[in-house]
Amino acid sequence: MEVNLRLKKHHKLIVASDGSAASGKTTGAKKISKKYGLKFLSSGLLYRFASYQLLKYKPKNEVTFLKKSFKKLNYNKLKNINLHTADISENTSIIAKKKDIRLILKSFQRNFAKKI
């Protein structure tokens, strides 16, 4: 089915996909964003980046450190970092359970959406 997508300049389109791990959310979202010229943001990649930062720098205060890291983060730079290692995957599942860290990433996502 072909969908014709036309938005007026003052309208924003935000699409979120939710589902279980390895269900194809990222693959589908990337294809849709490419086809319709939409910005793409992977929250999973953000969690992996947070994990990468914490493993690399081992800060004493994780929350303060991540707040600063995410204020400076250019999402496009994430493509140049290998965020798919076993250590990062293991640590990501641990930090994703921490409410303070989830709030930092949620704030980044909201700011990303506002800039579209």
Image (spheres, grey):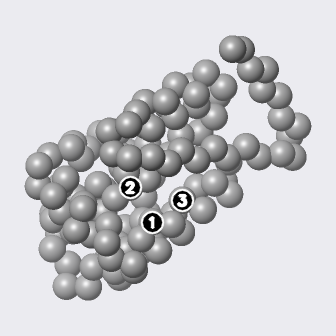
Distance between mark 1 and mark 3 Cα atoms: 6 Å
Residue at mark 2 = 46
Expressed as whole percent of the image width and height from the top left, the position of residue 88 reads: 18, 55
**Whether label 1 touches label 3, CB < 8 Å:** yes
SS under mark 1: helix
Residue 95: give its label.
none
Residue shown at 24%/47% (left/top)?
83
Residue at mark 3 = 109
The quarter of the picture where residue 97 lies is bottom left
Whether residue 68 is visible to the viewer of this picture, yes or no, is no
Residue at mark 1 = 105
Q: Is residue 60 left or right of residue 80?
A: left
**Whether label 3 touches label 2, CB < 8 Å:** yes
Q: Amino acid at mark 3?
A: Gln
The quarter of the picture where residue 96 lies is bottom left
Residue shown at 18%/63% (left/top)?
91
